[in-house]
Amino acid sequence: LPKWLASSGINAWERGNHWVLQMALAAEAPEITLLALWDGKDKGDAPGGTGQMVNLARKAGKIRIRIIDTQKLLE
């Protein structure tokens, strides 16, 4: 685990989201896409869920976000 993340005080799921995002950005690919199977709710059943990852990607500003809406899958 990188030092900047190891001492962050956040849970493993949140750390995982941050880490995966930073690895994607560090790759310097011409295009990065987050494909998320998500119900659209910012608050899930615990910290570090899909909502957090989508928000991190939005804040990064360089990431294309594609959402597969689970609510529509259940119709």
Image (spheres, rainbow, N blue to C red):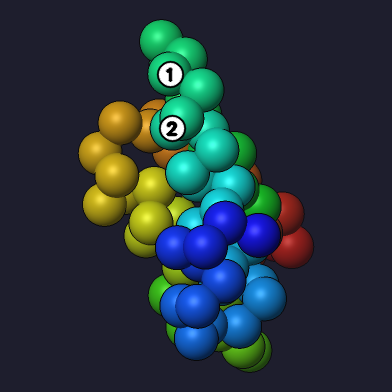
* Left or right of 43 in this view: 75: right
Identified by mark 2, the residue type is: Leu
Q: Position of residue 53 (x, y in %)?
A: 50, 59
Q: Secondary structure at mark 2?
A: helix
Kindly tell me whether residue 69 is visible in this rendering. no
Kindly tell me whether residue 48 is visible in this rendering. yes
* Left or right of 73 in this view: 29: left
Residue behind mark 1: 28
Which residue is depicted at the point 61% across and 83% down?
11
Q: Position of residue 44 (x, y in %)?
A: 57, 82
| Circle 1 crowding by C-alpha within 10 Å: few under 14, some 14–19, many from 20 | few
Q: Quadrant of the C terminus?
A: bottom right
Q: Which quadrant of the view contains residue 13?
A: bottom right
Residue occupying the far top of the picture: 30
Q: Which quadrant of the view contains residue 28?
A: top left
Vertical order, 36 against 12 (above or below): above
Q: Position of residue 63 (x, y in %)?
A: 38, 33
Vertical order, 18 against 49 (above or below): above
Which residue is depicted at the point 65% across and 60% down?
1
Q: Which quadrant of the view contains residue 15?
A: bottom right
Q: Are marks 1 and 2 in contact (CB under 8 Å)?
A: yes
Decide which of 15, 55 is in the foreground and name it: 15
Residue behind mark 2: 25
Identified by mark 1, the residue type is: Glu
Decide which of 52, 66 is in the foreground and name it: 52
Distance Cα–Cα, label 1 vs label 2 = 6 Å
Which residue is depicted at the point 59% across and 47% down?
20
Which residue is depicted at the point 57% across and 71% down?
6
